[in-house]
Image: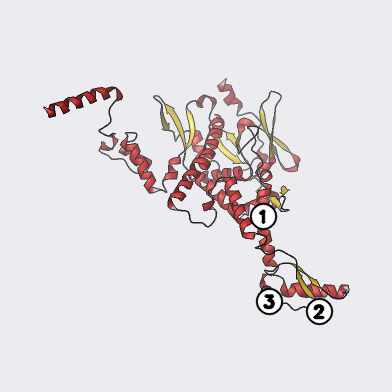
Amino acid sequence: MGFWNNIARLFVVPVEPEQRGSLENPATPLDSANLGAVFFMSKSGAKVDIPAIVSLPAFWRAVKIISGVIASLPVSVLESMPGGVNKANTSHPVYKVLNSPSPLYSKYKFLETLTAHLLLYGNFYAIIRFDIEANPKELEIIPDPTKVTYGFTDRGGLVYKLQEEAGKVRRIAADRMLHISNLSLDGIAGLDMPLIHKDNYGLAIANRDYGNVFYANGAHLSGVLKHPGKLTQEAYNRLRSSWESRNGGANNAGKTAILEEGMDYIQIGLSPGDAQFGETKKLSVADIALITGVPRFLLEESDPTFNNGETLTRLFFNYTIMPICENIEGEISRKLFKTSEMDRFSVRFDLNQLLRADTEQRGRYIDNLMKWGILNRNEVREMEGWNPIEDGSGDKFFVPLNMVDPTDAGEAESDSDNENEEENE
């Protein structure tokens, strides 16, 4: 049955040449107009769309941190060998396609885009192309995840629907679509991130726009000009134009205003302090830190203690980076390997690379592995990218001298008692 499933992967939902993105006929890139076509109105009154969210410095930095960390991790294909040993297989087609997904982008850009889509939209989609032997040969990123929906066939099979130009809908079988989703309520599609968090993003956008308008108005707040008499339309337009040209805009900040014809200026706006401009900005950074899982001290100016910073970084790796990696590994393993290979092969990120930045912690980690006989010196040197010790001495394992087999503990204790008695005599 597995053989026929693999053969079927070659023929399900044929892809027409003119529908494919390639070097000769690249997929249409997303411009700012396309990205902003869908938006949500937040309670703050700010329009929330993809460009606005990405333009928030804290969100931009959070996505760059997470996507950069994951994209820089080595990805391996592990093969289960007899005796429970996992061995890296660099000749497997899955390894090759993961490290060279497409002529259009590198492995780093593929994983960076994957993570960005996951955090920004809640879903990442890539079309899997197979060769004649049902091995994956290319992964084509779908630039706009909002163009993808899903449904079911009469037999209950999952199928994706890609909205293309001119109203065309392209159906793609589930085993030809790599789909990484964020938090989901149905186990398939991730929740729409801009919709779920529109009010949090909207507050940050509105607060930023407020600051821009404040400075655009000359770093002073709006008010009214009160005239003791009645103005003609011509006089009204002249006074308004004169006032805005002399006192509007950041370049006019600090200038002295001259009021004509007995007019009074009455301020009606709030100052930045009254509007809690700075506090709202900090609150928005905290919200984005919670949404993305990036420690707050990485998103704003702060001075954490050494121990606190180390702990927060470790928590970031454990509770943010690792779950995302596990999510990606699971989808890749079940979609790219043949049915007959799923029991033997798996995809793994090398999370040990995350410890390289902390030399002291990595030193303790390696010391424990060697001390308890888990790794020998040559295995450690290979892990660090160094050449092995050629005389073979690096292949020896070492364990502490005071370690004994639990079954021999009683005998060892008896021998120790006899030695003490002989010494006493």
Instruction: Determine whether the residue tagged by mark 1 lies in a helix, strand or loop.
Output: helix
Q: What is the quadrant of residue 420 in the picture?
A: top left
Q: Disc 1 designates what residue? A: 205
Name the residue at the top extreme.
Answer: 1
Rendered position, 34 above or below 412: below
Disc 3, disc 1: CB below 8 Å?
Answer: no
- Residue 387, position in %: x, y? 32, 42
Camera-side mark, 3 or 2: 2
Sort mark 3 into few (<14), some (14-19) or many (20+) by Cα contacts within 10 Å. Answer: few
Q: Amino acid at mark 2?
A: Gly
Rendered position, 411 above or below 401: above
Rendered position, 178 above or below 39: above
Tell me the residue at 30%/24% (across/down): 406
In the rendered view, does 248 fall on the left or right side of 3?
A: right
Whether residue 51 appears in this view of the structure is no
Disc 2 and disc 1: Cα gap in Å? 40 Å
- Residue 305, position in %: x, y? 45, 53
Q: Which mark is residue 255?
A: 3
- Reading the chain from its start, which is encountered first: label 2 or label 1? 1
In the rendered view, does 291 fall on the left or right side of 387?
A: right
Q: Amino acid at mark 1?
A: Ile
Disc 2, disc 1: CB below 8 Å?
Answer: no
Instruction: Determine whether the residue tagged by mark 2 lies in a helix, strand or loop.
Output: loop
Q: Which mark is residue 3?
A: none
Rendered position, 241 above or below 373: below
Whether residue 244 appears in this view of the structure is yes
Disc 3 and disc 1: Cα gap in Å? 29 Å
Q: Disc 2 designates what residue? A: 262
The one nearer the camera, 118 or 318, is 318
Q: What is the quadrant of residue 8 in the picture?
A: top right
